[in-house]
Image (cartoon, rainbow, N blue to C red):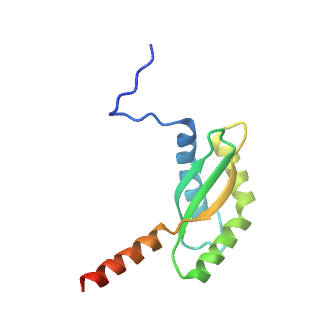
């Protein structure tokens, strides 16, 4: 008999588990294997994988100004094939999800909100 889900415990889908593995592997890979200086301080903050495990959206945060962010994204795009090939051996899936990098600007948004709130309080 299978366990029934209670409201207390969340059962993660296979896509969620693969996304977590991709996040860890790509994060480590960017730190240790990629020597492109444009990538610099890019950090993987979130990964979304399609339910059929064919596509992965990797959201990265980059420290710096707009020019720095553009350069980092160009570096990541140029490393996409290399990252994809490296992931193929680590994931153990029949098909490796297609990698697409996206810039996550939620930290910038949060900083702008904090600055506005601070300005309102003064």
The residue closer to the viewer here, 94 or 51, is 51
Q: Could you tell me which quadrant the C terminus lies in?
A: bottom left
Find residue 20 and report its horizontal and vertical position in percent: 52, 47
Vertically, is 22 above or below 70? above
Q: What is the residue that sits farthest to the bottom in this orientation? A: 122
Residue found 60% across the figure and 57% down from its top: 58
Q: How many marks?
A: 0
Q: Is residue 38 visible?
A: no
Residue 1 % position (x, y):
44, 13
Residue extending furthest left? 122
Q: Residue at x 64, y 61 (%)?
A: 101
Q: Residue 4: horizontal and vertical position, in percent? A: 40, 22
Determine the image quadrant of residue 93: top right
Residue shown at 57%/42% (left/top)?
18
- Pick out the residue farthest to the top: 1
Front residue of this view, candidates 100 and 82: 100
> Relative to the observer, which residue lies in front, 82 or 96?
96
The answer to whether 116 is drawn above or below residue 39 in the figure is below
24, 113: nearer the viewer? 113
Q: Is residue 85 left or right of residue 107?
A: right
Which of the 4 image quarters holds residue 112? bottom left
Question: Going 35% across and 28% down the picture, which residue do you hit?
Answer: 6
Location of residue 107 (image quadrant): bottom left
Q: Is residue 118 above or below residue 30?
A: below
State whether residue 79 appears in this view: yes
């Amino acid at each position: 008999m299978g366990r029934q889900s209670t409201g207390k415990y969340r059962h993660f889908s296979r896509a969620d588990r693969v996304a977590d593995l991709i996040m860890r592997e790509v994060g480590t890979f960017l730190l240790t294997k990629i020597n492109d200086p444009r990538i610099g301080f890019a950090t993987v903050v979130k990964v979304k994988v399609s339910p059929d495990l064919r596509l992965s959206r990797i959201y990265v945060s980059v420290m710096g100004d707009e020019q720095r962010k553009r350069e980092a994204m160009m570096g990541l795009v140029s490393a996409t094939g290399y990252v994809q090939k490296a992931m193929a051996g680590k994931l153990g899936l029949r098909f490796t999800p297609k990698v697409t990098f996206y810039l996550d600007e939620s930290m910038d948004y949060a900083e702008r909100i904090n600055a506005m709130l601070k300005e309102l309080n003064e």
